[in-house]
Structure formats: structure tokens, C-alpha cells
Image (cartoon, helix red, strand yellow):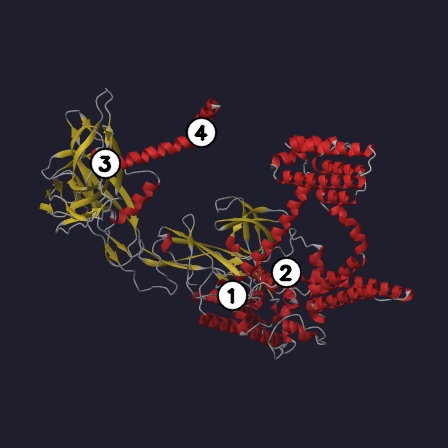
Amino acid sequence: MQSIEVTKLKRQCASPVIWLLCVVICCVAFVIGGETNAADVSAKLSSMEAYVGASLTLQIRIENAQDYELPELPQIDGVQIVREGSPQQSRNIVVISGRMIQEQSVTFLYKVTPAVPGTYEIPPIGIRVDGDVVETEPLNFVATVSETGDLLFVEIEGEESSVYVGEPIRLTLKIWLRPFRLADYDVTLSDGDMWSLRSSQVEWGEFGKALEEMRGRNQRPGGRSVLREDQNGQSHEYYLYEIDTEIYPKKPGKVDVGDVEIVFNYPVKIGPARRRDPLGMGSVFDDDFFRSPFDRPQLAIQKSRPIRAKAKFNSIDVLPIPTEGRPAGYNGAVGKYEIVTQATPDSVEAGDPVKLKIGITGDGPMELVRCPRLSTMPELTTDFKVSDQPLPGFVQDNMKVFAPTIRPKHEGVTKIPPIEFHFFNPETESFEVARSKPISLRVRASETLQLNSIVSNSDPPESQGSTNGAGQGGQNAKDSWASSLWQIHSSPRSLKNIPVQHSYSWWLAVAPGLVWLSLVVWQSRSRWMTWLPEWKSPAQRALAELESASDESAIGQAMATYLQRQFGSKRESSSWLSGVGGLRAAGGYGLAAEVESFLESCQREETAISSESTTEISELRSRGAELIEQLEIFCRHQRPSRRTQAKDVPAFQSRSVARILGWVLAGCSFVFASDVSAGEPMEGVTLDQTSMSVLFQEANQSYERGMAMLKRSGSDAASANDLVGEVASGQADAKAEFALAATRYQTLVDAGVENPQLYANLGNACLQSGQIGRAIVAYERALKFHPENDSIRTRLWLARDQVNESSDLDVSWKQQAQRAIAPILFRHWSSSRLRWSVISLAFAFWAVLISLRIGRWTPEARRVAHSMVSLIAVIAVCGGAIWWLSTAAISKQSTGFIVADQVTVRAGDSESFPALIEWNNADGRQVHVIQSRGNWSLIRTASTKGWIPQANLQVIAEG
């Protein structure tokens, strides 16, 4: 017995947790018993001699301090002290003769740079350490001027003596640096080694950009060996480094190249390489430049001094651009240029936008080239409406590209005239002009009158309230309902955010059905009660069988059935031995023996004849109940693995429960996500309420002006004496007003305003201005808030009908049905009325069924009621199907629409990838958006998959 206890104690001591606890206790005791040195502060300079402009390193070290404050450095005239990097911390633990000594330190590094020669003293620096102020020792150093002499020369050369403002000047920075020679080792530093000695104090001026470009290409200026005379006329070898750059003077006078001063850390002493200086001075002194091929020690610079030289430059005169003979279209270009143009699409309606691409190439600075002044060209403004606002461009392959938008004023225009670009040629010292080639164009009569003839045939209604489709039915005049399509919302409510709301009125159609179902369940309760025992657990069923058992055989059978259900195997077996075996397999050996004894006693009592059978049966029943209770307790304390081995749950049941819980959680998450997303503001332009109100009023005014122009154009078109050009010009002006209104509505949307009224206004303005894709997206977003708005849905289908037919367009049967249903509901009924009609029919349907359940009907009345219920059901189902078709979303949230006339689909997300297909007249084309990357989106159609710029695409789901 004693040996067993010793073995257990050894096992407990061998536990890893006990060992770890012992080690921790020993370490804590060791630390407590250790010693810590007193706090100490010291300061040290890397050298007592320095050159003007070169930095020394000041090191301040605080040792064994628990608490300290940052050093406050003194101000010294003629010396700049700057902190370098972050503090360096170290910790050491030393054990000497069984005693542990802790050493910890923190080191601060500073750059000390003298600006003028002289002798300097760094006074004592007071530092608060552990509550006491400790001062460092004063430090002295001497600063001297490093003479450059004939070691370095810097010059700037230019090709021209005078230039005009904006004319390019090519300059060359030349640096002559004398190589360092080490006679003891017969070694001369290479041009690369010498170039690497440049100081961080170098000022490159206008040549800094050229150095950055070379560094980006992992290059450096190459030094070639040349001879140059020094100040005494003697020739020496130098490394000549040349850096070219090109500048463009922006004002008359002298060329300004900036401050160009070159500084090198010229070697003074070279010796065997050593370990880096702990003061941080190894960045210059310890660089290894060369290794001898004959196993001599590797050499490194051990000491250097700064040499500097400012660039000499014979300034170049900058002449102003002459004012005499300057054309009106000149915008500052200097050099020689050519211009090319391209227009898309080549067939438009009067007033539709035409994107004009202008490309300018030449020998001048492309980033400074500005777009030609189109408003000063009478040949263009006669037939086209152009903007006089400055237009930005971008440089692509040495070409400055601009993309202005022009609009033909009337039909019959056959070409876009040549575009002129005026520039000043410095070689001929005169103004010249480059002209592009004319571009063929076909301009048709505007179809805006065809779309808006419904407006011109009747006066708009006095009330400009809601454009909701509800309430429009029952009007006899066609013009009245048609004119209401293009009304806009002008109430202040259009500037309020409205969350997406879901209609719960359909519960009114379901609630009576729940009442009917409850009646069915109540009236069939006797049938349900017969099924209840089957839902009980095996223990409950066994206890119920024991209570009703009248003899030993029934008691034994109840216990055997319970064992089989709770512990038996999957194989069907009529013997209770299977359950007893399962109980033993689960670890219940004692219970298995008691149960087996109980079942054997039931069998013995069954064959025996006793005068006290009633008493024995009661005892057996009680004993059986106790055993079942013990077995249930055993099952609850069983490990899951053993319980699973005893009785596995079918896999399909587990998957079903998991699937049901998953759907429930997903539904709750969807509801919560919907509530959250409805309240989140959109990111965009920040506007206050006053600014939004002003912008909204200006947008409404622009839209109303456009509608008035269309109405006047329609009236003028009816007169045979009016000119066609004037009518078309009015339509072009109207489209310009609509485009302005659309821009202002879009600004409000970008500011975070979301509601169906604003989106409807935006869709109207975009559709009237010819922006079909943007109009479709705006209407789709409006329907997301108000799916029963038949007016908006009718306008959406009008917009989709304007899209050019394509083989990629796949219209489903649901969309075709909705296209036919939407105008009918808008004119004669409404989706909202249809919904309430269906709900009323459903209510009547359930009311008849409930009355059939609770009332007393004659057979003839029941037959009539059943026929009426069937008819109501058919009508309600058809009405519900029509409502569902009329309010279902036309497009998915990931659907996108092209918002440009011409789009190039590429194989990758960059302009450098090859083009897969060119789409002309693509505005409004529907695509499926797969993913977005940067400023590009991957889209797919029935026949194409590729990348397009995001600027040419709008997706229904914002963000």
C-alpha cells in the first residue's frame, strides 16, 4: 500500500503543470533575491572634431532607471541638434557567485550639425531619473571648414541662349569628381563607389525629378573618366557625371533652375574593414567598397570629410509670347503640334450628345497643353451647341486627349467641321494653326417630340403632386394620364431619406386561414390525441405501460421494449438481451446485472402460482420504475461518444435539423440586415439642408424650362411656316436643360438622399436628355422603394424600349408579361388596388370555409358554397399572379447598365489589354457585373465576357 502511494506521488510530481509551477516559483524567488544597480546617465559624442555641414552623433544613455523623462536638449548658436530614430532599449541579466544582477538601459541618438566653424560646448543636460535630476558631463568639439579645392566642380549647360515662355529647354548637369587613390594598396575607387559617397544634404533643384526617374528604373548616372585642368592649369583625372533634364519656363525673365548644390563625403582614410560603430556612424565609415583578389583584408572607408560645390550656370533669357497677331483661339501652346479628332456615335438625333475625342501631339509639354476653345469656332457653333467651360484632359502615349461633348442643334447636319488648334512656333517666331480632318455625321430628327407628344397635346394638370400609378385608373382622356408620366415631384419630402419598406397587408389574407386551420385542428382533436403517445420518449412510454400492466409478463415486456429502444442495436431483435448488451457496452455493468435479474424474476413469476399476486405485481411495477429512472440518469451522464455508439441518430435527421436552424438564422439575419441597410447613409458629397434645397429647386426649374421648350417646339412644328432648324434648335436647348437638371438631381443622390420621388425625377431628366442607361438605373432604384408605382414602371419600360436591340438582350417571359401589364394597370387600375382586391377575395374565401366548418348548411347550400369558393380561389390566384408579375423586380441587384455610347470590352482591367469587342450605341445595354477591381468591372453578356471602365457602367445596387 505504501509503494502505491509513493508511485502516485511520483506521477503527480512528474506532471508538466507541477514542474512548470515549480520553475516559476524558483524564478520569482531568484528575481526577488537579485540585485539592481543604481541609475546612471551618460553622454558621449562620436568625435571631438567635425566639419561644417557634417553631422556628429550624440549618444545619451540612461542605465538601470525604472522611471525617466525625455532629455531636453539645449539651444546652441550655430549648431543644429536633431533627434535620430527611436530610443534603443536593452536588458541583460548576469549571475555572479549565485547572485543575479539586472542591467537595463535606454539610448537616445541625436545628430549634431555645426553650421559655422568654431569651438562649441554642449552644456550639461539635466534628466529626471527615478524622481531625481541627473546631469551629464559637458562635451566639447571643434568645427572646421572642409576645403573642396580641386576635388569637385559642378556646372549646368544649356543649348539655347534665349527661349520663349513655354518653350522646352534641355539642360545638362555636369559633375566632375576627382577619384580617391590609396597608394599603399594601389587601389582607386570606381565611379560607382565615388557616386555612392554623395551626402544627404545634396540639393538637386530642377534635376531632382530626373534623379527620381532614374532611381525608379534602378539606375544611376554613369561616370566616365576625363581629364580636366584645375585652378593652376594642371590636368587631372576626374569622373564626369552628366544628368539631363528638360524644363519649361513659365514666365519671362531668367531661367530658374533652383538651388543646385552637390555635396560628397570625400574619403580621408581607408583601412581594413571593422565592425560597425556602436554610435551609429557605420553608415559612412564602414562601407566596404572593394576586396583584394589576393586574400588581402577587405578595405573600408574609416574617415571622410564633406566637400561641396554650387553649380555654375550662365542664365538663359526667357522672352514673352508676342501679343501682335495672336489669334482668338490661342491658349498658350508653344512648339509644333498636330491635331486629330474622332466622334462617336456617327448617327444621332438632334440634341443628342456626341462625344468628340481630340488628340494633340507635338514637341511641347503635353501636360501643359489645353483643350482648343471650341466656343470661338463659328464653323462649329453654327450647327452644334458647345460648352465654353475649360475641359481637363489626360496624356496617353505622348498625346494629350480631350473628350468634350457637343450636341447638334438640328437635323440635316452631315459633318463635324475641322477643329483648329493654335500654337506659337518659336522657330518661325509666328503663330500657326493645326486643323483636323472633318468627320462625317448623320443627324436625324429628334424623337423627343414623339415621346412627349402626349405632353404637347394637352395642358399639364394643375396639381403636380405624386406620380403614383394608384389613382390614375378610371380616367377617360388619354392625354390626361399620358401627361402625368413626365411630372416631377417638387415637394420638400423629396429631400428626405426613406427606408425600403415592406408591405405586411398580405397577412390579412393569411390570418383568416390560420383561424380556419385552428378550427380544423380542434374539430379533429380526437384523432390527434391517438397520435400523442407516439411522440413520448421511451421512458415515458415505458412508465405508462408499467402503470397499465396487469401481470408479470406485461411488466417484463414493457422493460424489454424500453431496453430495446434506448440501448438496442439497429438490427431488429425481439430479445431483451440486445438491450442488456447495449447497456453493458455503454459501461453500465451494474445496472445491466440488475435489469437482467429483474427480467428473469418477471419470467419466474409468470410461471409460478402465488396467492399474493397483486402485492408482487405492485412491487415489480415499483422496482421497474426505479430501474427506468436509474437508467435515465445513467443516459444523461453518459459521454456523447458512448451514447452515439449505443444508438446513432440517423444522418438525415441531423441534416434536416441543421438545415431548418440555418434557414431560421438566415431569415433573421436578412431581416436585421434589411433594417440596418435601410438606415445607413450613403457616402458621397456632403451638403447641408439649405444647399440641397437650393440645388433641388434649380434642378426643378431646369426641368420645367426643358418641358416648356419641348411644348413650344411641338407647337412650332405644327405650323408650316416655321423653319425646321429653329424647331430642332429648341429641342437641343431642351435636352441641354434636361441634362443640367439630371446633373443636379444626381448631385443630391450622391449627397446621400434616397427616396422614390428623387429617383423618379432623375430618371425623367435622364430619359428626356437622352441618357438612357442612367434613366433605367434611376427608375429601377425608385421601384426598389415603391414597387407598386405603375407610373414609374411604365416609364422604365419606355426607357428600355429606347435601347438598341442586341443579340445579347435576353428578355424573359416574366419581363414580357410585365411590359404588357404595367401600362394597363397604370391607365385603368393600379397595383395597389389589385393587391387589396386579391386580399378581399382571400378574406371572402376563408370566411366561407370557416362558415362551412361552424355553421349548419344544407347539402344544396354546401354545393353552391363549394362552387363559389372554387371560383373565388381561381380569381384570387390569378389576381395574385398578375400582381406578382406587375411588381416583381425587372433586374437583379447585380445587374449593370452601360451609360456610354461607345464602350470597348477588354481582356483585362487596363487599357493595355487587347480589345475583345467594340460596342457602338451601347447606352442602356444590360450586362451582368461579376466583380470590380480598381476602376474596372468584369461584366458578362450572353456572348461576351470582359472588362470595362467603371465610368461607363452603373449598377442597380449602389455602393
Amino acid bearing label 2: Arg
Assign a secondary structure to mark 3: strand
Outermost residue toward the front? Answer: 611
State if disc 2 and disc 1 touch (CB < 8 Å): no
Q: CA distance from mark 3 to mark 2?
A: 86 Å
Of tags 3 and 4, which is closer to the observer? 4
Q: Of marks 1 and 3, which one's residue comes earlier in the chain? A: 3
Q: CA distance from mark 1 to mark 2?
A: 25 Å
The mark found on residue 753 in the picture is 1
Of tags 3 and 2, which is closer to the observer? 3
Q: Of marks 1 and 2, which one's residue comes earlier in the chain? A: 1
Relative to 222, 929 lies left or right? right
Relative to 250, 686 lies left or right? right
Q: Of marks 1 and 4, which one's residue comes earlier in the chain? A: 4
Q: CA distance from mark 4 to mark 2?
A: 82 Å
Q: Position of residue 444 (x, y in %)?
A: 60, 64
Q: CA distance from mark 1 to mark 4?
A: 71 Å
Of tags 4 and 2, which is closer to the observer? 4
Amino acid bearing label 1: Val
Instruction: Give the residue pinned by disc 4.
Output: 12
Relative to 93, 499 lies left or right? right
- Observer able to see residue 212: yes
Instruction: Give the residue pinned by disc 2.
Output: 800
State if disc 3 and disc 1 touch (CB < 8 Å): no
Instruction: Give the residue pinned by disc 3.
Output: 35
Amino acid bearing label 3: Glu
Of tags 1 and 4, which is closer to the observer? 4
| Circle 3 Cα neighbour tier, 10 Å, few/some/many (<14 / 14–19 / ≥20) | some
